[in-house]
Image: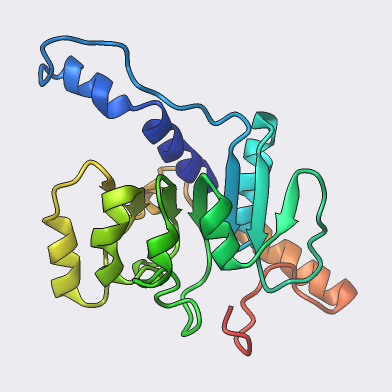
């Protein structure tokens, strides 16, 4: 999942749509492709479980600064990473990855109120659709690029988003789940159980009391 999240980020940064339009004869002339770099960008990680940590690990070579929000207080601040509130992450980050479980607390985590502070960001939601309020999507894609799956439990809302025509909205449909190499993460389960038997706690889990 982390690899897919980063792959789709590069797709956006390097503006492959523009090049593919030319290759498929939708553009008559190929000018210089307007692209952006990942180097030294401010990366927001809302959720710091296995996927969030893997995203950070894969991106370390680009000398990014990471802003992290997670219920765990065991994350240490250093020159490359800093614990921040969700509001600060939305304000400060150039690129935001949302990788939290869907709970009552994380439902509509991005909503009409806090979406107002988002301008010129790339937002990649690899959580469930309901983490983003569907009523906030219109304003989000006006000023930002949004990548996520619009498969809401409310099928009417899903259909409305499917019908939206915007280059700033890319619907991903959980493609990582149908990767030919995807399999049930037995190694992670085994590691978790071994750690629990030795130390009495799990490595990655959802705190249902804190709903996060």
Q: Which of 74 and 144 is in front in this view?
A: 144
Residue 131 coordinates in the image, percent (x, y):
41, 70
Q: Quadrant of residue 208?
A: bottom right
Whether residue 75 is visible to the viewer of this picture, yes or no, is yes
**Location of residue 138 with respect to 207 vertically, above or below:** above
Residue at image position (73%, 71%) is 72
Q: Is 119 on the left-hand or right-hand side of 16?
A: right
Residue at image position (63%, 33%) is 40
Q: Colour scheme of this structure image?
A: rainbow
**Location of residue 6 with respect to 62 vertically, above or below:** below
Residue 54 coordinates in the image, percent (x, y):
64, 48
Q: Nearer the viewer, residue 160 or 86?
A: 86
Residue 29 coordinates in the image, percent (x, y):
16, 9
Residue at image position (32%, 49%) is 143
Q: Is 155 on the left-hand or right-hand side of 212?
A: left
Whether residue 51 is visible to the viewer of this picture, yes or no, is no
Residue at image position (19%, 15%) is 23
Residue 55 coordinates in the image, percent (x, y):
60, 46
Q: Is 61 on the left-hand or right-hand side of 185?
A: right
Q: Quadrant of residue 199?
A: bottom right
Q: Which of 154 and 30 is in front in this view?
A: 30
| Picture quarter with the C terminus | bottom right
């Amino acid at each position: 999942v982390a690899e897919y999240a980063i792959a789709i980020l590069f797709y956006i940064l390097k503006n492959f749509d523009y090049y593919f339009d030319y290759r498929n004869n939708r553009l008559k002339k190929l000018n210089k492709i307007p692209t952006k770099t990942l180097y030294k960008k401010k990366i927001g990680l809302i959720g710091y479980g296995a996927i969030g940590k893997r995203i950070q690990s894969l991106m370390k070579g680009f000398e990014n600064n990471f802003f992290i929000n997670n219920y765990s207080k065991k994350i240490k601040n250093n020159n490359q990473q800093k614990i921040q509130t969700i509001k600060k992450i939305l304000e400060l980050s150039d690129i935001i990855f949302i990788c939290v479980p869907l709970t009552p607390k994380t439902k509509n985590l991005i909503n009409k109120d806090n979406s107002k502070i988002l301008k010129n960001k790339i937002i990649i939601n690899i959580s469930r659709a309901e983490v983003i309020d569907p009523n906030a999507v219109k304003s989000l894609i006006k000023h930002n690029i949004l990548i996520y799956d619009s498969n809401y439990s409310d099928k009417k809302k899903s259909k409305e988003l499917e019908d939206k025509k915007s280059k700033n909205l890319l619907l991903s449909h959980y493609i990582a789940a149908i990767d030919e190499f995807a399999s049930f993460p037995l190694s992670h389960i085994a590691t978790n159980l071994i750690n629990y038997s030795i130390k009495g706690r799990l490595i990655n889990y959802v705190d249902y009391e804190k709903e996060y």
